[in-house]
Image (spheres, rainbow, N blue to C red):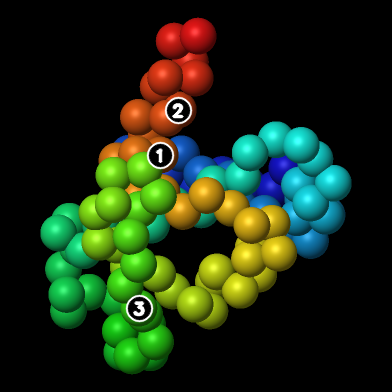
Amino acid sequence: MGRKITFLGVEFNVLDEEDILAAQLSDEPKIYSMIRVADADPNGGSPQLRARRVTTRCSRCKEVCWLDPESYKDVAVLKPTMLCLECTAARAEEESDG
């Protein structure tokens, strides 16, 4: 696994090509985390990001979230479940509780 980053208190793995290939072959569920529109500064991010981002809904809570198509295109082949950061954290907590 590549390096790890912490974003809004949630730790994420940064994937490289080998990680993506291994995930494609794995049976583990895949998650793509997104920031909820309600939690984000609408003027945040680069002008390029603001121009290309779109909204979509969290698969779990149906909250409207920002999606960056540029970063998503690399993981789209994994067919991940689209979750907001709140639901990603809740899911991780549920898994750790057993």
Identify the mark nearer the N-term, 2 or 3. Answer: 3
Point 16% across, 68% down: residue: 41
Alpha carbon separation for disc pair 2 and 3: 26 Å
Residue 67 is situated, as x and y percent measured from the top left of the image, at 40, 69
* Residue type for callout 2: Ala
Q: Are marks 2 and 1 in contact (CB under 8 Å)?
A: yes
What is the secondary structure assignment of the residue under circle 2?
helix
The answer to which of 74 and 78 lies nearer the viewer is 78
Residue 44 is situated, as x and y percent measured from the top left of the image, at 22, 74
What is the secondary structure assignment of the residue under circle 3?
strand
Identity of the residue furthest to the top in this view: 98
The answer to which of 78 and 12 lies nearer the viewer is 78
Point 35% across, 67% down: residue: 56
* Residue type for callout 3: Val
Residue 89 against residue 16 in the figure, above or below: above
Point 29% across, 44% down: residue: 61
Residue 16 is situated, as x and y percent measured from the top left of the image, at 73, 58
Disc 3: which residue: 54
Q: Are marks 2 and 3 in contact (CB under 8 Å)?
A: no
What is the secondary structure assignment of the residue under circle 1?
helix
Disc 2: which residue: 92
Residue 79 is situated, as x and y percent measured from the top left of the image, at 64, 57
The answer to which of 97 and 13 lies nearer the viewer is 97
Disc 1: which residue: 88
Alpha carbon separation for disc pair 2 and 1: 6 Å
* Residue type for callout 1: Thr
The answer to which of 91 and 9 lies nearer the viewer is 91
Point 30% across, 84% down: residue: 50
Q: Find residue 39 and report its image quarter.
A: bottom left
Crowd tier of the residue under label 2, counting other residues whose Cα lies within 10 Å: few below 14, some 14–19, many 20 or above? few
Alpha carbon separation for disc pair 1 and 3: 20 Å
